[in-house]
Image: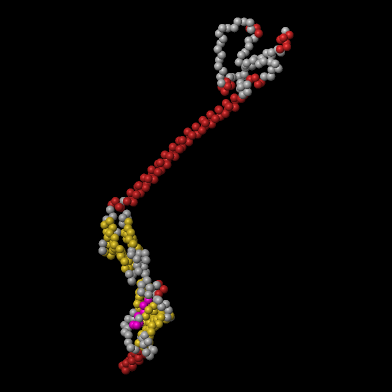
Amino acid sequence: MSFSCHVLASFLLIFICSTKGAAPTNITVLGKLGDDINLNIPEFQMKDTVDDIRWGKDINKIAQYSVKKKKKTLYQRKEKYHIFENGTLKIKRLERNDSGNYMLKIYDQDGKNMLEKMFDLRILEVVSKPNMSWSCTNRTLTCQVTSGTDPKLNLYQNGNYVREDNKIIVYKWSNLNTVQFECTASNNISEESRTEKIKCSEQGMNIYLILGICVGGVLLLVFVALLILYISRRKKQPRRRNGEELDIRAHRITSEERSRKPHHIPGSAPQNPAASQPPPPPGHRTQAPGHRPPPPSHRGQHQPQHQPQKRPLPPSGTQGHQQKGPPLPRPRVQPKPPRGATENS
């Protein structure tokens, strides 16, 4: 192909591109969750030929600005969007559903497309301050971030880089009693860091061992106390049984004695012996029960000077208990002859 043909083809290509307008370019924009953001138009200057600026999200219209009329039109969510005279779109209080593709189109007075751009808005959450914990027993450090979009952790020991990870880092350091660590959490829109100086003494290294010994000693004392209590209770049980047996035996003996008493001593004999004898005939004088008359053969004999002293009778309650065998017979009372018989004689 000749040189003239190359020149002609290049001219036609330039002419076609200029008539169609600029091709849309994608621009990635990062927004912070909860903040406002401005979608600025890069490499654009306002000219007299500019007539209309339009913004849209996906396939929906958002805002429009007419340069000649100086009229701003918001199609949806007026409290959410705002368009400036230079064509910049402001989005207030970013939410997660605000992420997406925003299309910008600029037209001249003849209605031709002067500029077309695509903005890819991504909403990110800021990272939280990292948490650091450590153990002097096994010399292990843990650095962790709890919130944030796509966080990255970096760990430094005494100013030297150690390790990198996404959400958590577990690191075991060498045998050093004093060491300084710095943990940094970051993403594309935020960064947080924490620094800790760790001192591990020998006493601190053995604190778990000391606690284990103390707990073991307490458990041993409790076990010994329970064992002694159990043995003492086992020893008291035979004594209680022996005492109960003795009580049962004593109760049996007393019950047997009580059951035998009515057979030996009738309850009515000692208390009222005259009740069992037949009643005397009429006109008969009863003698006192305490004096016993002598038989007729001894009435004329001389009575002894000193009569024997009578024994005191025991109480009625104990008399029946001390007397053994059947009761003594009572003396018969001689009936007194009637008065008529004595006079005739």
| Location of residue 104 with respect to 336 vertically, above or below | below
Q: Is residue 165 visible?
A: no
User: Which residue appears at 39% of the width and 72% of the height?
Assistant: 95
Q: For residue 194, what is the image quadrant?
A: bottom left
Viewer-closest of 4 and 233? 233
Q: In x, y percent, where is residue 6?
A: 32, 92
Q: In x, y percent, where is residue 146?
A: 37, 64
User: Which residue appears at 40% of the width and 75% of the height?
Assistant: 98
Image: magenta residue range: 85-91
Viewer-closest of 29 and 319? 319
- Whether residue 217 appears in magenta in the rendering, the answer is no
Q: How many marks?
A: 0
Q: Is residue 333 visible?
A: yes
Q: For residue 340, what is the image quadrant?
A: top right
Q: In x, y percent, where is residue 111?
A: 39, 89
Viewer-closest of 117 and 341? 341
Q: Is residue 120 left or right of residue 176?
A: right
Q: In x, y percent, where is residue 336?
A: 69, 13
Quick one: quadrant of the N terminus?
A: bottom left
Colouring scheme applied when the structure was drawn = secondary structure
| Location of residue 198 with respect to 61 vertically, above or below | above
Quick one: quadrant of the C terminus?
A: top right
User: Which residue appears at 62% of the width and 13% of the height?
Assistant: 292
| Location of residue 246 with respect to 299 vertically, above or below | below
User: Which residue appears at 30% of the width and 65% of the height?
Assistant: 193
